[in-house]
Image (cartoon, helix red, strand yellow):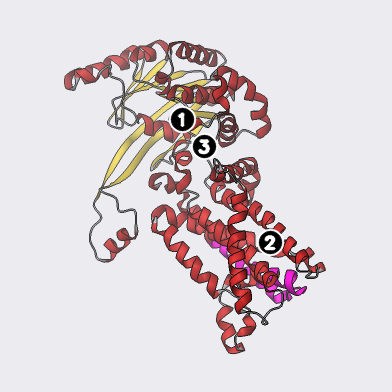
């Protein structure tokens, strides 16, 4: 692939977690080591050997069952996790919309959080001041903008987070499932914005369990199964494979909403 | 080390915002609000002053100033470490969801306490005025020990912030350590109480060199000796170097433990 047109390159990425059973977070763990009592754990590969490239201006969907490694992969791309092995290259600015309330402090007001959120993403105070009004306007949550965000409904959270992440005008937007929280009109507003994002040559990575949304929005879909990339192709193709996989094991889960925390 | 310097400059706006957030969030919804940040140490100083001026009467004229000149910077040191131990764990939400240079959190903890330190000079100045203690020109020298103290504190902050990620006991142990440390440091008493042969023992305490400049400048109107200034900066930079080294080595793992 031509280097100039590349937005993200993921090369052979593996993420291993150490899952400690009933983790002693304390000095007890140290004592356990001294007394040679084993701290029991197992290693878990959330993502194993995943490689793909995303050219600029593409909307890529990530699908897979719960625990297939979608969110972990997103966090690696967003730079929250440093992968155990492999490498990730991201060209341009990236705004993560990974979980509700990411980068917000619940005691601060919406307005204060806009600034904090922007600074966390690496934008300057001046830039955020400049965009503040537009962000508030798009989020459209009325007087709540001056209330601490802990009083927000999950919809309001999402409106504000989406508004900040898209209004700062990143080159790459990473969205994890959170669109499902907004109501119908706001979802439309978001999708419309995503479309315009793509039209201006930006890159979007979208995780969703709403297969219709994925099929409609994405140019390309990647299917993850147990941390491995199994399909990377046209939306219809990946969705077909995903449904096929699920039909065999758990047909009920196909369109069920994800019980994400 | 250059990384620390570069990132601090680069993220200065974020660090400032986090430091202010630290102060506002802590005192939101309390009636006195931000005043608590000042009242707490002031009340503690008051108690100590009242108790010890009676006991130490005659030993040190203007005991309150003698005490406060060192208690103010010590309070900064101990409060910073208290904040710092929680600075990574307490910001787990941010660390787990946003890519952010981890060092901004300990640095912000120290900066927010530096703001407190500056403000707590106000009661000290008032007491100096009320007691008609002379205002020595050596007050002008105070930025030097403040700098050394900030560097030393930052180093310790990095160390304890890291340690607390792995063992949450650290925050609790730290409180006890700080109490003992407080009494082992000549803050409420003077080193002169001890025969010279015991003073060598105090020289092992790195905080002493840094705090000494405050008392000399405010209470005695003297400047520290060159050796003592050098010692204070050697201790400060050694702490910073060691603390940041540990922090840097582990920072990519924090996200898995918080």
- Indicate which label's residue lies in the foreground, 1 or 2: 2
Does the image show residue A102? yes
Dominant secondary-structure state across the stretch colored magenta: helix
| Picture coordinates of residue B38, whole percent (x, y) | 62, 54
Residue at the disc numbered 2: B146
N-terminal-most mark, 1 or 3: 1
- Chain letter behind tag 1: A
Does the image show residue A171? no
Q: Helix, strand, or loop for circle 2?
A: helix
Is B54 located above or below residue A126 in the figure? below
Mark 1 Cα-neighbour bin, 10 Å: few <14, some 14–19, many ≥20: some
Report the Cα–Cα distance between label 1 and label 2: 47 Å
Report the Cα–Cα distance between label 2 and label 3: 31 Å
Residue at the disc numbered 1: A9
What is the quadrant of residue B135 in the picture? bottom right
Residue at the disc numbered 3: A107
Q: Residue at x 52, y 53 (%)?
A: B83
Q: Residue at x 65, y 51 (%)?
A: B115
Tags 2 and 3 touching, CB below 8 Å: no
Is A191 located above or below residue A250 in the figure? above
- Chain letter behind tag 3: A
Q: Which residues are magenta?
A: B214-242
Q: Is residue A10 rendered to the left or right of residue B23?
A: left
Instruction: Evaluate whether label 2 is on the same chain as label 3.
Output: no
Instruction: Evaluate whether label 1 is on the same chain as label 3.
Output: yes
Q: Quadrant of the N terminus of chain B?
A: bottom right
């Amino acid at each position: 692939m031509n280097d100039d047109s590349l937005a993200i390159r993921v090369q052979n990425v593996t993420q291993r977690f150490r899952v400690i059973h009933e983790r002693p977070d304390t000095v007890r763990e140290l004592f356990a080591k001294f007394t040679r009592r084993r701290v029991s754990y197992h290693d878990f590969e959330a993502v194993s050997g995943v490689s793909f490239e995303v050219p600029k201006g593409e909307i890529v969907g990530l699908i897979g069952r719960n625990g297939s490694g979608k969110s972990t992969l997103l966090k690696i791309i967003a730079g929250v996790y440093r992968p155990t092995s492999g490498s990730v290259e991201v060209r341009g600015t990236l705004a993560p919309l990974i979980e509700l309330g990411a980068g917000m402090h619940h005691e601060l007001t919406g307005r204060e959080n806009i600034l904090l959120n922007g600074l966390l993403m690496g934008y300057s105070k001046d830039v955020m001041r400049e965009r503040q009004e537009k962000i508030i306007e798009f989020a459209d949550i009325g007087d709540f903008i001056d209330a601490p965000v802990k009083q927000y409904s999950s919809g309001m959270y999402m409106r504000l987070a989406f508004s900040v992440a898209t209004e700062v005008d990143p080159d790459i937007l990473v969205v994890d499932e959170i669109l499902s929280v907004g109501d119908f009109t706001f979802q439309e507003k978001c999708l419309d914005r995503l479309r315009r994002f793509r039209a201006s040559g930006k890159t979007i990575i979208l995780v969703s369990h709403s297969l219709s949304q994925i099929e409609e929005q994405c140019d390309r879909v990647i299917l993850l199964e147990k941390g491995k990339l199994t399909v990377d192709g046209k939306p219809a193709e990946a969705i077909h494979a995903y449904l096929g996989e699920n039909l065999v094991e758990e047909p009920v889960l196909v369109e069920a909403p994800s019980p994400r925390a | 080390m250059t990384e620390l310097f570069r990132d601090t400059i680069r993220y200065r706006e974020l660090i400032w915002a986090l430091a202010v957030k630290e102060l506002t969030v802590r005192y939101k919804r309390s009636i006195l609000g931000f005043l608590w940040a000042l009242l707490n140490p002031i009340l503690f100083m008051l108690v100590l002053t009242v108790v010890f001026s009676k006991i130490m009467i005659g030993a040190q004229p203007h005991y309150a100033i003698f005490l406060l000149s060192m208690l103010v910077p010590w309070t900064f040191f101990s409060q910073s470490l208290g904040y710092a131990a929680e600075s990574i764990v307490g910001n787990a939400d941010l660390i787990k969801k946003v890519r952010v240079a981890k060092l901004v959190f300990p640095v912000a903890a120290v900066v927010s306490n530096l703001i407190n330190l500056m403000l707590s000079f106000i009661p000290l100045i008032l007491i100096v005025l009320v007691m008609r203690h002379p205002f020595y020109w050596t007050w002008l020298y105070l930025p030097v020990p403040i700098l050394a103290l900030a560097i030393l504190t930052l180093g310790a902050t990095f160390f304890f912030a890291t340690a607390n990620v792995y063992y949450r006991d650290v925050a609790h142990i730290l409180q006890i350590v700080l109490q003992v440390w407080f009494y082992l440091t000549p803050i409420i008493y003077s080193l002169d109480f001890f025969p010279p042969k015991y003073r060598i023992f105090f020289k092992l305490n790195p905080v002493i060199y840094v705090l000494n400049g405050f008392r000399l400048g405010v209470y005695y109107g003297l400047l520290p000796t060159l050796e003592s200034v050098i010692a204070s900066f050697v201790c400060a930079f050694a702490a910073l170097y060691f603390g940041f080294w540990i922090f840097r080595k582990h920072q990519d793992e924090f996200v898995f433990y918080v």
